[in-house]
Image: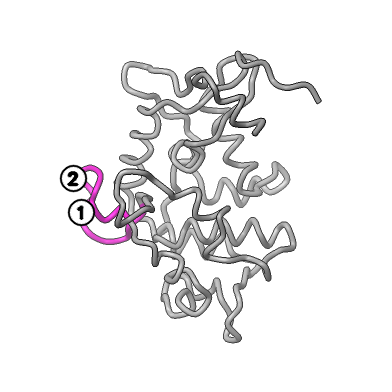
Amino acid sequence: MANPDPSTLWVIRVPAVRMSIETLGSQKLHPTLLMYLYLRLKAREGLLSEASAASDELLSMIEMPGNPEKPYYFPMIDRGRRDVGPLPTFWRATNISGSWSPGSIRRQVAASWLADDSGHYAMPPNNADLALENLLRGTRVSAAAMGAFFLRNQVFVKDQEPTVHDLIDTFRGRFGFPRSEAADFDKLFDTTAPALPDAEPWFEPAPAGVLEVLLG
C-alpha cells in the first residue's frame, strides 16, 4: 500500500477542541460515559472479557499534557455549575482507572449495569437506553463535540479538507456504531453540525513530520 500524500493529512484545529470542551462541560455527563463507549466497543468486537480500565486504548484518549500530578483530562462531570467554563475538576489523577474497575462501577448507582455480581464487565442488550437515562440524564450529547475531543490526536486522511460531518462519521466508526445500528447512535448523540466562531474550519493540514511519525 502506497504511503499517503502529506497533502492529504489533516488534524482537528485547536478552536474545535476548545469548543468541544466547552460544549461537553456545559452538559451534565456522567464520568463513566467514556468507559461505557469503550466497553460497548469491546463487546461488539467480542472482547469484553479482555476489557481493562488501564488499557492504553482507553487512557490515550484522555491523556493531556500540562499537569504532572493529574495526567488525564476529560470534560465530563454530573454535578456542580455549568456556566463557568473549563473546570479544574476536568483534570483527573492516575487513579481514574480504579474508578472504572468492575467493582467500582458496580457500586455506582448510574452505571452499575456495566458490571455483574461476579466482578466482570457487562453489556446488557438495552445498553443505549440505560446510557441515555443514567449517563446522559436523558439528553443527547453532541457527536461533533465528542469527536473533536476524543479524536483530537488523530490524523485524518482525506483528499479534500474534512468537514464536521466527516468528523462525526469518524467518531461513529471509531466507537463501533455502524450505519446498521443508527438507532442506537441517534438515541445517544445529537448529530447537528455546529459552527465554530467566525465560521472557522474544523481541520487544518497536519504539521510537517506527521507522516514520518505515522510510518514509525
Q: Which residue is mark 1?
A: 81
User: Does residue 205 lie above or below 119 as drawn?
Assistant: above
Q: Is 78 included in the stretch rendered in magenta?
A: yes
The residue positioned 52% from the left and 51% from the top of the image is: 188
- Compare residues 151 and 186 and report the one nearer the observer: 151
- Compare residues 46 and 205 and report the one nearer the observer: 205
Q: Are marks 1 and 2 in contact (CB under 8 Å)?
A: yes
Taken as a whole, is the magenta stretch helix, strand or loop?
Answer: loop
On residue 62, the disc is: none
**Picture quarter with the C terminus:** top right
**Disc 2 on helix, strand or loop?**
loop
> In the shown orientation, is residue 38 left or right of residue 197?
right
Q: Which residue is mark 2?
A: 84
Q: Residue furthest right?
A: 1
Q: Measured from the top left, where is residue 36 in percent x and y? A: 53, 61
> In the shown orientation, is residue 8 left or right of residue 195?
right
Q: Is 4 included in the stretch rendered in magenta?
A: no
Q: CA distance from mark 1 to mark 2?
A: 7 Å
**Disc 1 on helix, strand or loop?**
loop
Region rendered in magenta = 76-91
Q: Measured from the top left, where is residue 30 in percent x and y? A: 39, 61
